[in-house]
Image (cartoon, grey):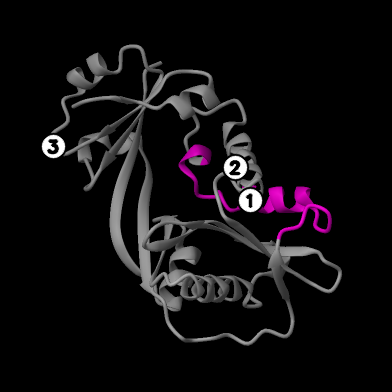
């Protein structure tokens, strides 16, 4: 059981954060307590549920993947375009990004008490717009350039990965999410990338239904536990 120190997380939260990838599902709590010395928070990643650690469970991380297809969705209602800070409202985009983390472990875990969840998602969308954590931020707008949905895309060697995706509550049920996924599919094909990946939470039933109805299949599941040394 080795602890990996997480520099970015530690700097962001202001206290030492570490990570343990579990291979042995029999976790010795006494050993964990010894390993946690010097850390305020440790993430534990496990390929299966650990019954003895149910009280620490904060996320069922599900990675889904699909092969790109030649399918195309016609759209005459909404405009899809790259986010332009000179044209679009960044605050609206930021609020949507925060809403995309409704099931995030950083929101669910009540031990975060300093608005970390909001600050984290605000940072992610800011870095995405700046091109640091995504190569494209695509927004769906109406005739008034109002942002009704968005998606961030991360280009990797063999897959196009969806970072954040959300649709404004008032615009849900109008097919915007599938338009954004269709854009992702066509973008991947234009880049000669054959697969798309997305990660969501097991409790996010609407997202799971959306992705699976679009053709995504579950690739793997990781159970994430938060051990607080406080």
Q: Quadrant of residue 55?
A: top left
Q: Quadrant of residue 193?
A: bottom left
Query: Foreground residue, 72 or 93?
Result: 72
Residue at the right extreme?
144
Q: Position of residue 221 (x, y in %)?
A: 29, 54
Disc nearer the start of the sequence (3/1): 3
Give left or right: position of 87 versus 44.
Answer: right
Locate the N terminus and report the quarter of the image it occupies: top left
As drawn, 167 above or below 55: below
Please report the residue visible at 45 percent of the width from the left and 77 percent of the height from the top: 214
Q: Which residues are magenta?
A: 83-107
As drawn, 110 above or below 131: above
Please report the residue visible at 16 percent of the width from the left and 25 percent of the height from the top: 28
**Residue contact at pointers 2 and 3, CB within 8 angstroms:** no
Give left or right: position of 137 versus 3.
Answer: right
Query: Foreground residue, 167 or 3?
Result: 3
Q: Which residue is mark 1?
A: 97
Q: Residues within 10 Å of mark 2 (few under 14, many from 20)?
A: many
Locate the C terminus and report the quarter of the image it occupies: top left
Q: Which mark is residue 121?
A: 2
**Residue contact at pointers 1 and 2, CB within 8 angstroms:** yes
Q: Residues within 10 Å of mark 3 (few under 14, many from 20)?
A: few
Query: Helix, strand or loop at disc 2?
Result: helix
Disc nearer the start of the sequence (2/3): 3
Say if the magenta span includes residue 224.
Answer: no
Mark count: 3
Query: Helix, strand or loop at disc 1?
Result: helix
Q: Which residue is mark 3?
A: 24
């Amino acid at each position: 059981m080795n602890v990996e120190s997480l520099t970015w997380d530690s700097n962001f939260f202001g206290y030492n954060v570490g990570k343990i990838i579990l291979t042995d599902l029999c976790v010795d709590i006494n050993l964990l307590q010894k390993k946690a010395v010097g850390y305020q928070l440790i993430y534990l990643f496990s390929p299966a549920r650990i019954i003895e650690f149910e009280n620490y469970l904060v996320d069922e991380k599900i990675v889904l993947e699909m092969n790109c297809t030649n399918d195309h969705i016609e759209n005459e209602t909404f405009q899809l375009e790259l986010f332009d800070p000179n044209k679009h409202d960044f605050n609206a985009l930021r609020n949507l990004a925060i809403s995309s983390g409704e099931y995030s472990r950083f929101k669910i875990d009540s031990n975060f008490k300093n608005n970390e969840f909001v600050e984290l998602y605000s940072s992610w969308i800011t870095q995405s717009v700046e091109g640091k954590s995504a190569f494209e931020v695509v927004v769906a707008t109406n005739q008034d350039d109002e942002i009704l949905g968005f998606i961030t895309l991360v280009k990797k060697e063999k897959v196009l990965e969806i970072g954040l995706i959300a649709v404004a509550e008032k615009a849900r049920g109008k097919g915007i999410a599938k338009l954004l996924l269709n854009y992702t599919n066509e973008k991947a094909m234009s880049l000669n990338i054959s697969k798309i990946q997305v990660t969501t939470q097991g409790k996010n039933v609407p997202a799971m239904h959306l992705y699976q109805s679009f053709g995504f299949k579950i690739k793997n599941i990781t159970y994430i536990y938060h051990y607080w040394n406080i």
